[in-house]
Image: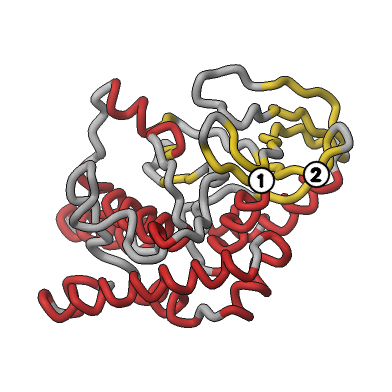
Amino acid sequence: MSKFLKFIFILVFVFSSSLYPFAQFTKEEIAEMDEWEEYLKTAEITGHEQMQSREAVTNPYILQLEKNGVLRQAIWKNPEGRMRGYLEGWKWEIAAYRLNRYLGLNMVPPTVEKRFQGDRGSCQLWVDTWMSLKDKYEKEISVPPIKVLHWNRSLYLQRAFDNLIANVDRHQNQYLITEDWRMILIDHSRSFRTSKQYTKKLIYDEKNKEGSRIMKELPREFVEKLKSLDHDVIKNAVGEYLTDNEIEAVLLRRDLIMDWLKKRIEELGEDKVLY
């Protein structure tokens, strides 16, 4: 095989095996999600430390966990109601994770309910990553050319997901980036709003206050999953962690997303919008 053909083979392999699947956790990691959920629920808490930072409005704890010799860290929080002017809820962390799994996104780390110091709260597996989006911008790190398509599509998926769950607080430290440029999303305690402000318009569209941040391209498989959502489907996915009103608000936002996509497809053609 010539060097040129070898290069083409490698290029095709890289794009087919790592760029087009839209899940951000690897296949191996996704296969272990159920095990990590069980680990988080049943592991012994061997130590804890409360996070101290201006951004940690919910006063989360870093838990040290151990089970059968496996040591890991997790983030535990239990906000409920208004905190420093923001509406927070620990149940929304779990609902976001579960809905993310149903949709096939697999961008949110395993998150379960766990009791700590006698209180119910969300417990999310600590994921070691390379940097945050804030680090990327501050250090002026560019996305490698071969990863640009994958990176941009990850951003479009993030925007679609946050549009769906009405996540009003996606700041740069909540985007975690792996060394191979996969995107992991954390912190969803300000999601699932039900007011008209969040059921009449999308957070990310052409009118976004920070400039045009749109769902430029989305996977067909993801869009089909969006179409499949109804009250029972969401209830089965998230369990007790969303109220009926919160589920209905998700469905209203799903309809907004589908209407937006329909208009964009009419303007540009389906192949320019769905892949």
Note whether 134 is above or below 12 in the view shown. above
Q: Residue at x 20, y 79 (%)?
A: 270
Q: Quadrant of residue 70?
A: top right
Residue 14 visible in the snapshot: no
Earlier residue among tags 2 and 1: 1
Q: Residue at x 61, y 49 (%)?
A: 93
* Amino acid type of the residue tagged 1 in the rendering: Trp
> How far apart in space, not on screen, are marks 2 and 1 (Cα)?
9 Å
Q: Residue at x 18, y 73 (%)?
A: 264
Dot 2, crowdedness within 10 Å: few (<14), some or many (≥20)? some
Which of the labelled discs sits on residue 37, or is there none? none
Query: What x and y, as percent, mark residue 187?
Result: 54, 41
In the picture, which quadrant includes the C terminus?
Answer: bottom left
Which of the labelled discs sits on residue 90, or is there none? 1
Label 1 secondary element:
helix
Residue 196 visible in the snapshot: yes
Note whether 247 is above or below 64 in the view shown. below
Query: What x and y, as percent, mark residue 62?
Result: 69, 27
In the picture, which quadrant includes the N terminus?
Answer: bottom left
Q: Is residue 42 left or right of residue 225?
A: right
Q: Are marks 2 and 1 in contact (CB under 8 Å)?
A: yes
Query: What x and y, as percent, mark residue 22?
Result: 40, 61
**Which residue carries the number 2 mark?**
120
Dot 1, crowdedness within 10 Å: few (<14), some or many (≥20)? many
